[in-house]
């Protein structure tokens, strides 16, 4: 996949630099009105009641920051989780990919109305799939109907590694969920195709585009898409523990820290930190990454189905209505041993990013999303003055 020659943003006519988000000092005092006791209590409960190895959360309010943690980063050594911890972010990768696509659209390098067939001739074909009827916007908001390749575990298990093209071939060996544009279904195949279109449009790897267009300008030093099938997490990180999505409390726990995530690639292969995600989403929500037209496109949502409760989906981002009635914006992601949520207020000034280094939950939470929802409720639904 890393076969393209490099060039810089100065080679791209009409490219505007990203306005970098302001840095936040780790020692900055918390906002006076912020009550972090409820958040810290929930972090402890995620470990004591939920049975998770460890959890961390970073809360930002303008230029102020609070960081909390409970449990451990490593069950063998008892090491605590830290602000510098890197972790696999799963489907939050989709927001980075959609952002790159929209910046290319702003430059006139592609259009959201372009079809998959225009960019990837012959790839989406067979079993009633037709790339000529699917446009890029449908990929980004999951209205394409293209089968989700990760739902075919038998095909995935036949080989240890998968190229993006082979993942798409698994998808089109199944019939579509619906005709393009007539429904909504979450499909990782959509973002694998979006990643391939980015590479075709730029002549560079997806990893290079993410680094040059987002991570570099925003100073996201812990954020990257792994090279090829590299299974390691570079830099400080917690261990990642999985029960392989078994729900019984006695299910064995496996260490999934070293993981070849190449089969998830543009759909979920990235690594980041809580601080980086808050900075990225704060800048994105605040309109500092995309021009107004593309920003509007990203945050124009469609109804979801069989997904997160009370959610709507835009282009790589989602809105979630909390039990108190407030709506937050961002994205969540899960990969073996790591679940993350990064959501904030619409203007990007208030953000919360949470990560757990286990993929199960007990104690009344159906899964870590229940814990994350409670944390968002504690942050965004607190009474005035508490």
Image (cartoon, helix red, strand yellow):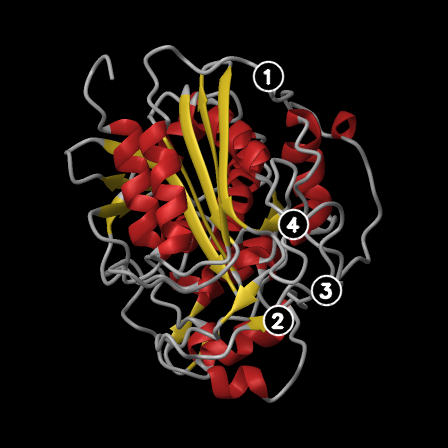
Q: In terms of sequence position, does the residue under pointer 2 or pointer 3 come before the other?
A: 2
Query: Dot 4, crowdedness within 10 Å: few (<14), some or many (≥20)?
Result: few
Q: CA distance from mark 4 to mark 2?
A: 40 Å
* Residue, disc 1: 27
Q: Position of residue 218 (x, y in %)?
A: 64, 26
Instruction: Give the residue drawn at x 48%, y 25%.
Output: 66
Identify the residue shown where x is 15% and y is 34%: 324
What residue is at 66 percent from the left and 34 percent from the top? 215
Distance from Cα at disc 3 to Cα at disc 4 = 22 Å
Image position, residue 173 (x, y; %): 46, 84
What residue is at 60 percent from the left and 38 percent from the top? 109
Q: Is residue 65 above or below residue 212?
A: above
Q: Which mark is residue 231?
A: 3
Give the residue at mark 4. 79
Q: Are marks 1 and 3 in contact (CB under 8 Å)?
A: no
Q: Are marks 2 and 1 in contact (CB under 8 Å)?
A: no
Q: Earlier in the sequence, mark 1 or mark 4?
A: 1
């Amino acid at each position: 996949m890393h076969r393209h020659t490099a060039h810089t943003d100065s080679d791209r006519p009409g490219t505007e630099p990203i306005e970098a988000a302001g840095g936040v000092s780790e020692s900055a005092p918390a906002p006076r009105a912020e009550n972090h006791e409820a958040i810290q209590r929930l972090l402890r409960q995620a470990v004591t009641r939920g049975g998770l190895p460890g959890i961390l959360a970073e809360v930002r309010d303008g230029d102020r920051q609070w960081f909390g943690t409970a449990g451990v980063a490593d069950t063998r050594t008892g090491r605590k989780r830290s602000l510098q911890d890197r972790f696999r972010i799963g489907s939050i990768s989709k927001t980075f990919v959609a952002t790159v696509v929209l910046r290319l659209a702003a430059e006139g390098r592609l259009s959201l109305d372009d079809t998959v067939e225009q960019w990837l001739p012959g790839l989406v074909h067979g079993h009633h799939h037709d790339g000529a009827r699917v446009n890029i916007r449908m990929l980004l908001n999951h209205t394409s109907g293209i089968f989700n390749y990760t739902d075919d575990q038998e095909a995935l298990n036949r080989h240890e590694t998968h190229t993006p093209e082979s993942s798409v071939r698994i998808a089109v060996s199944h019939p579509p969920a619906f005709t393009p544009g007539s429904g909504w279904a979450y499909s990782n195949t959509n973002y694998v195709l979006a990643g391939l279109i980015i590479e075709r449009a730029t002549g560079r790897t997806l990893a290079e585009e993410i680094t040059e267009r987002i991570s570099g300008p925003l100073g996201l030093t812990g954020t990257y898409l792994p090279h090829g099938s590299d299974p390691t997490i570079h830099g400080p990180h917690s261990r990642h523990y999985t029960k392989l999505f078994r729900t019984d409390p006695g299910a064995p726990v496996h260490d999934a820290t070293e993981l070849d995530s190449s089969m998830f690639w543009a759909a979920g292969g990235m690594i980041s930190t809580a601080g980086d995600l808050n900075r990225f989403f704060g800048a994105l929500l605040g309109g500092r990454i995309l021009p107004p037209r593309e920003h509007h496109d990203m945050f124009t949502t469609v109804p979801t189905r069989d997904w997160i409760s009370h959610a709507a989906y835009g282009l790589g981002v989602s809105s979630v209505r909390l039990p108190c009635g407030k709506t937050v914006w961002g994205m969540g992601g899960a990969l073996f041993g790591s679940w993350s949520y990064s959501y904030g207020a619409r203007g990007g000034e208030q953000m919360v990013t949470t990560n757990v280094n286990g993929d199960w939950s007990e104690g009344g939470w159906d899964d870590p999303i229940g814990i994350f929802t409670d944390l968002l409720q504690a942050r965004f639904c607190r009474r005035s003055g508490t």
